[in-house]
C-alpha cells in the first residue's frame, strides 16, 4: 500500500512539474509575442497554446490593453490633426480681416480721399473688426466649453415657454428674409433638466444658422417621444447636396454654408459641444435636399419630464 501511495505521489509530482514547465514555456512564448508586438514587428495579438483559464484571461487582458493603447494613439493623432487644422484655419481667419483692416487704414491716411469715401472705409473697417471680434469671442468660448471644469447649472426648464420666448426674438430676422417658419410646439409643458444659458445658446446658434442660410421652407418643432424629447429644425439646403453634413459641426468648417462676413464658423460646433456637456446630442442629416438638425435629450430621472 505504501509503495502504491509513493508511486501515486511521484506521478502527481511529475505531472505538477510537467505542468509548471509547460506554464513556464507558455509564459516565455507570450513574452516573446508581446515583445514582437511592442517592437511593431507584427500586429498579431497574443494567442495561448496551453489550455489554462487564468493564462487565457491574462492574454485577453493584455490584448484588451493593446487595443486601448491603439485607440488612444489614434485619438491622439486625430486631436493633433484637428488642432493643426484649427490653428491653420484660425490663422487664416484672423489674417484675412486684419489684412483688410490694415489696407483700409492706409487708404484713410490718404489726404486725397473724399468725405464719402472716408465714411465708406470707416464702415468697412468696423465691419471687419466685428468679424474679428466675433471670431475671437467664439474661439475663446469654445475653448472654455470643451474644458473639463466648464460649469453647468442644471435646473428644471419649461422648454415650451423657453422656446416660445427665443422664437419671438427671431421674428424680425425671419421676416427680413421673407421666411414664415412652420412652428410646432406641444400643448403640454415639456420640461428639461439642463443649464438655461446653455440651452438658449444652443437654440439661438441653430436659429442664427437657419436664418442665415435658409431660402425657403423652415420647420421648427419640439416633441416628446417615448424615450427622448427632440427639438428639430428643418430647412431647404440644396447647396449641401452630396456633402457630409456632419462636417458642419467641425471647427472652422470652410463650406460657404457656415461662413459669412460676420460669422466665425464656430456656432454649430459650440452648440454641439454644449449639448454634449448637457448629456444630450445634436445631429444633422440631409434628406430630399433638406437639412434636419435635431437636439435630443434622453428621458430619465434627470432628463425630461412633463410638468404638471
Image (cartoon, rainbow, N blue to C red):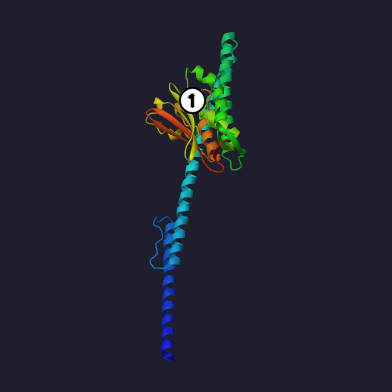
> Residue furthest toward the front?
308
- Please say whether residue 114 is visible from this viewpoint: no
Across and down, in percent, residue 58 comes to 46, 63
Quarter occupied by residue 27: bottom left
Residue 50 is left or right of residue 138, and the answer is left
Q: Badge 1 is on which residue?
A: 183
The number of numbered discs placed on residues in the rendered structure image is 1
Instruction: Give the vertical position of 215 relative to 294 (above or below).
Output: above
Across and down, in percent, residue 231 comes to 49, 32
Name the residue rendered at 41%, 78% in the picture: 15
| Nearer to me, 267 or 251 | 267
Name the residue rendered at 59%, 30% in the picture: 137
| Nearer to me, 199 or 27 | 199
Quarter occupied by residue 302: top right
| Nearer to me, 292 or 86 | 292
- Please say whether residue 175 is visible from this viewpoint: yes
Instruction: Give the vertical position of 61 relative to 205 (above or below).
Output: below
Amino acid at each position: 500500500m505504501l509503495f502504491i501511495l509513493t508511486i501515486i505521489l511521484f506521478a502527481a509530482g511529475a505531472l505538477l512539474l510537467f505542468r509548471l514547465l509547460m506554464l513556464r514555456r507558455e509564459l516565455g512564448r507570450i513574452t516573446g509575442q508581446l515583445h514582437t508586438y511592442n517592437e511593431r514587428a507584427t500586429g498579431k495579438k497574443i494567442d495561448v497554446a496551453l489550455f489554462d483559464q487564468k493564462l487565457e484571461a491574462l492574454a485577453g487582458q493584455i490584448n484588451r490593453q493593446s487595443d486601448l493603447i491603439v485607440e488612444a494613439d489614434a485619438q491622439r493623432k486625430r486631436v493633433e490633426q484637428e488642432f493643426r487644422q484649427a490653428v491653420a484655419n484660425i490663422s487664416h481667419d484672423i489674417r484675412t480681416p486684419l489684412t483688410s483692416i490694415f489696407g483700409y487704414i492706409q487708404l484713410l491716411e490718404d489726404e486725397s480721399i473724399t468725405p464719402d469715401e472716408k465714411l465708406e472705409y470707416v464702415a468697412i473697417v468696423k465691419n471687419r473688426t466685428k468679424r474679428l471680434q466675433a471670431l475671437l469671442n467664439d474661439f475663446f468660448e469654445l475653448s472654455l466649453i470643451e474644458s473639463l471644469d466648464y460649469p453647468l447649472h442644471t435646473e428644471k426648464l419649461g422648454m415650451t415657454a423657453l422656446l416660445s420666448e427665443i422664437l419671438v426674438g427671431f421674428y424680425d430676422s425671419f421676416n427680413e428674409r421673407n421666411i414664415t417658419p412652420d412652428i410646432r410646439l406641444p400643448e403640454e409643458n415639456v420640461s428639461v433638466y439642463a443649464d438655461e444659458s446653455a440651452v438658449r445658446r444652443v437654440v439661438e446658434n441653430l436659429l442664427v444658422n437657419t436664418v442665415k442660410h435658409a431660402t425657403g421652407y423652415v420647420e421648427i418643432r419640439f416633441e416628446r417621444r417615448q424615450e427622448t424629447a427632440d427639438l428639430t429644425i428643418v430647412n431647404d439646403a440644396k447647396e449641401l447636396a452630396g456633402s457630409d453634413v456632419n462636417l458642419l459641426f467641425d471647427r472652422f468648417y470652410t463650406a460657404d454654408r457656415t461662413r459669412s462676413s460676420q460669422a466665425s464658423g464656430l456656432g454649430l460646433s459650440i452648440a454641439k459641444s454644449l449639448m454634449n456637456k448637457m448629456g444630450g446630442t445634436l445631429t444633422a442629416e440631409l434628406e430630399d435636399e433638406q437639412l434636419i438638425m435635431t437636439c435630443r435629450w434622453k428621458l430619465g430621472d434627470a432628463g425630461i419630464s412633463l410638468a404638471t
